[in-house]
Amino acid sequence: MLRRCIQRRMSSSFFNGKVAIVTGASGTIGGAIANALADDGATVFMAARRVEKMRMLEREGLHSIGTDITDENSVVTLFEHVKKKCGKIDLLINAAGIAAPDVSIEELSAADFLQVLNVNVLGSFLCAREAFRHDCKRIINIGSISSMAPRPNSAAYTASKFAIQGLNRALALDGRQRNISVGVLHPGNVASELLSPEIFKQRQDQEGLLDLNDLVRSVLLMASMPPSANVLELTIMPTTQPLVGRG
């Protein structure tokens, strides 16, 4: 009985008729989330700069729009286009993100630091602002466990994910009076294009890597909550990843 109940709650019928925007959809995580939402019946607009990669994913219910989330006009145009085409926007997934070069703080350039903040923080802010303006009722930000336990040589990325944590809470507070739910998912180690082959193998061998499907299921869980419920923060990581403590 419990299994049937869970299956009904996670069924595709919840997303039928829903309109979603997924940023960073040309990447591993964003693309997987966009695909899953479309599979479950949503009309999904993928937003990223790498249009060619998104077009390879296009099918019924899955559309691509070339967007630079660090450019205010580009973001405004994205949301206006979706609203005009569909009449509403139900869900925003802020999945776009980049990492800085793996170098010491002494070697990290101001340009590289600012580039990470522009994509990871400014881009998320601009998209969330437009979501508020168009009365989008649910926003899910993709954070990182780096906002809890940084790695060495990650000043730019870690700073950006701490900022996402603060932005998420501020947005959740501002959305409360308008019944707009805002939450953040903090993934641990997950296979993505941000990892070099060397880092991929190292983390897989020493700490474990999260199955991408499990990350996507977590996003769908957050997105399928009723309007009266908000998953403010959710952390998902490999069971073997050493985050919780020593031992």
Image (cartoon, rainbow, N blue to C red):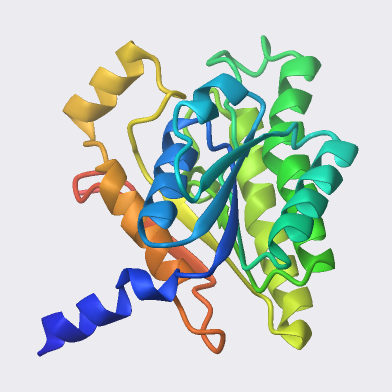
122 shown above or below 217: above
The front one of 235 and 81 is 81
* Horizontal and vertical percent position of residue 236: 34, 55
Residue 214 left/right relative to 120: left
Task: Kindly indicate the quadrant of the structure image that contains residue 70.
Answer: top right
Q: Residue at x 77, y 52 (%)?
A: 79
| Residue 200 visible | yes
> Residue 78 at x, y = what percent?
76, 45
Lateral position of residue 95 relative to residue 207, left or right: right
The extreme right residue here reads 73
Q: Position of residue 1 (x, y in %)?
A: 10, 90
How many labels sit on residues? 0
Residue drawn where x is 39% and y is 42% of the image: 32
Residue 53 against residue 92 in the figure, above or below: above
Residue at the image position 52 percent from the left and 70 percent from the top:
17
Residue 166 shown left or right of residue 44 in the figure: right
